[in-house]
Amino acid sequence: MAESAHHSSDMWVFPRSAEVTEFVTRKTFTRPGPVTLAMALTGVLLVLGIIGFVMKAAQHGFDDHTPWGYYAAMFSFVFMVTSTGPLAAAAFRITKSHWRRPLSRVSEIFGILGIFNILLFIPLAIVLPTLNNPDVGHHELALRRSIWFEGPIGSPLWWDLFGVIFVGINALALLWLSAVPDMAEAYEKATGFRRSLYGMLAGFWKGTKRQWLIHKAGMALLGAWYFMLLIFVHFIISSDYGQSMIPGWKDAIFPVVYSLSGFQSALGLILIIMFILRRFGGYQEYIGISPFWSASKLLLAFSLLWCYHMFSFGITYWYGRTELEQNVLKYLLFGSYGGVFAGNFFFSFVMPFLVLLWNPVRKSDWGPALAGASALIGAFLFNIRIFVGSFNAGNVYGEFITEVPPPVYPGLSDILIVIGGIGGAAFIYLLATRIIPIISLWEIKEGLLYQKVDTFIRGRYLVLAKPE
């Protein structure tokens, strides 16, 4: 496709290889005023979140799960977005997508939040009701119906906890393995703490052919394993902390909707970060329009898939018409949390669809970023609707909900917890960018070896080499 006829001049970028290391390293080692301000603000939010958590724990303790609905929604939102973030780099690397090079590290840095997610999950593991109600007599057994088929008490706790831990470890391993060549290269210019850290984490790297082959194979294996593990953990989190908390709610489609919300919101947040880096971070020579244009097609596909699966869930229950199915629809879609669902539907489907419908918008940096911001808001409302509703649906050991519970609004501690959790995730991400280059040096340099713009007859075309 001719560059001059169909694309803007910055569709593809061709930075000089000799300047990439110096520029990105300098950006990493310095701390601009806006970044410092953002870190200060998000750090304050994290402190407020800790205060809100202490207030909630002091007031309600951990014996009853009901007061922790907004905490569950906050954890699920942070986990859904940040755990899915590294999957973008892993998936696009496996498919050998050339355009993904500028966004690979942006997505992989989310792996640093694996530890944060583990810490956030511990209170939820404590408050999760057991499968068997110990308060009933021996002649009457009450069960919380779940994916564990009424297994031994505590099974969900350990499976869920181990799943979150393994996802966090895998994400950290992906980040470390990808960043090893860059940390080894930056070691020569680093001083103080950075130099010691780079030496400890990447001191073994010499850049030999054997090391590059192992590096490539390791990235592929870790990426494939991470995809399978993440989908499984999404399934158990959405089932144990969502469906099983609403008596009688059985839906095979909901875990798919949960994962799709994660794909959509994580890709949306990556596009927002890319937009900020390109417009305000000084990375315009390293981030062209091509990543936005290509990723926007996937974001549109995720939006359509999300709408399709929500329709599949709703139409099944709509035509079922049992008392339980009607109550679930009234509770989560049309009654108690109907307003939240309307916002969820608008931001997760309507707005991204209308924005990304137009080719000129998809071929810009602001259009996909705007659609990504909308998807992120939709995912937040999705988690509020599902997990606040699930934690406040009544007796989890009942056969089904016979009455539609009213909505539960946040208190002061809930608001502090929500903004603190999101602010804490942003603070850790920003802190990580001061240590790990946010642009993958080795991938950008590798890409420069495989691309050039050449002339054919009267047009100029991007020529890509295929190394394999």
Image (cartoon, rainbow, N blue to C red):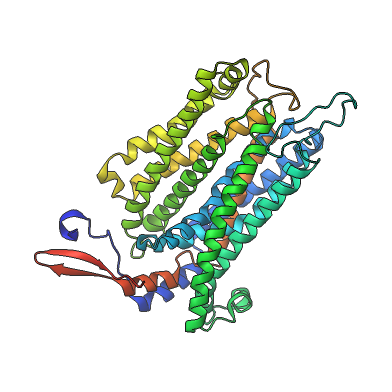
Q: Horizontally, is 168 left or right of 463 in the view?
A: right
Q: Horizontally, is 116 left or right of 23 in the view?
A: right
Q: Name the quadrant containing residue 154.
A: top right
Q: Horizontally, is 15 left or right of 187 in the view?
A: left
Picture coordinates of residue 63, whole percent (x, y): 82, 35
Q: Name the quadrant containing residue 453.
A: bottom left
Picture coordinates of residue 121, whole percent (x, y): 70, 47
Does residue 416 appear anywhere in the picture? no
Badge count: 0
Quarter containing the N terminus: bottom left
Q: Residue at x 78, y 39 (%)?
A: 57
Q: Name the quadrant containing residue 324.
A: top right
Q: Residue at x 43, y 38 (%)?
A: 305
Above or below: residue 455 compared with residue 43: below
Picture coordinates of residue 457, whole percent (x, y): 9, 66
Residue at the limit of the structure toward the left, as seen here = 458
Above or below: residue 462 compared with residue 308: below
Q: Residue at x 64, y 37 (%)?
A: 239
